[in-house]
Image (tube, rainbow, N blue to C red):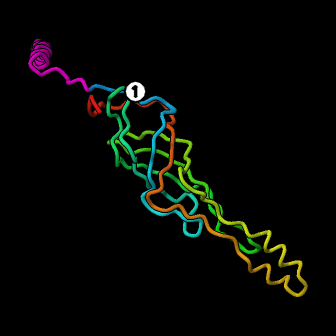
Amino acid sequence: MFRGVLFAVLSVLASQAIAQDSPPATMVPVQLLPAKTPLILAFTDEVSSKTALKNGEIRFIVAEDLHISDVLVVPKDTPAIGEVVHVQKSGFGGRGGELILAARYISFGDQRIALRSLKPLAGPYAGKNNSDAALAVSMIPYAGLVSLFITGGEIVIPAGTRASVLVAVDTPLPVLSETK
């Protein structure tokens, strides 16, 4: 019994001595990336209503360094991920293609920075709607069946196209550098 108590006391004393000899934990400076902070992303691959799949992954990169108060918080070329929310190919009767995309997050080390409000900065990115032409052709005698074979255009967003996004929630990030 005495040996057990003695061993417990010596263990506690030894652990306190080790704790005093160990170096203090290093503090990593942290910068808060506020919600609604705007960022610019660039599509890394072409996205088309003809080839995209619903719930398919879209890849982006951060197009410009993001600084907050002269502190680099997200460097250029950091990867980001998005998703195809809705897709429909162009169709008969002049219907144009449809494509709805969402930016989901930036992969930043072990962290994910949640994103929202994806808006391509160049365009227009809309499938051409030829339904008026199909309707007009359908009214011509003996040509009505031909109107079914008039198709609309596809939506195509080329690789490299820039898009604006917003940070979805306040996110603490490690400071990368102090000046621009």
Quarter-wise, where is residue 53 in the image?
bottom right
Residue at 50% x, 49% y: name it. Answer: 163
Residue at 79% x, 83% y: name it. Answer: 146
Number of numbered discs overlaid on the protein picture: 1
Residue at 74% x, 75% y: name it. Answer: 92
Q: Is residue 16 highlighted in magenta?
A: yes
Task: Name the kind of residue labelled 1 in the image.
Answer: Leu
Q: Is residue 82 highlighted in magenta?
A: no
Instruction: Indicate the position of residue 39 as horizontal and vertical percent values.
Output: 45, 40
Q: Quadrant of the N terminus?
A: top left
Q: Main secondary structure of the magenta part?
A: helix
Q: Is residue 26 above or below residue 66?
A: above
Please give left or right for residue 124 compared with residue 112 in the image: right
Query: Observer-nearest residue: 150 or 51?
Result: 150
Instruction: Indicate the position of residue 156 as horizontal and vertical percent values.
Output: 56, 64
Instruction: Indicate the position of residue 106 as horizontal and vertical percent values.
Output: 42, 44
Please give left or right for residue 144 compared with residue 70 in the image: right
Residue at 35% x, 47% y: name it. Answer: 78
| Residue under numbered circle 1 | 32
In terms of secondary structure, where does tag 1 sit? Answer: strand
- Extreme bottom residue here? 142
Quarter-wise, where is residue 180 in the image?
top left
Quarter-wise, where is residue 29 in the image?
top left
Q: Is residue 139 above or below residue 95?
A: below
Magenta-highlighted residues? 1-28
Instruction: Indicate the position of residue 115 as horizontal and vertical percent values.
Output: 50, 41
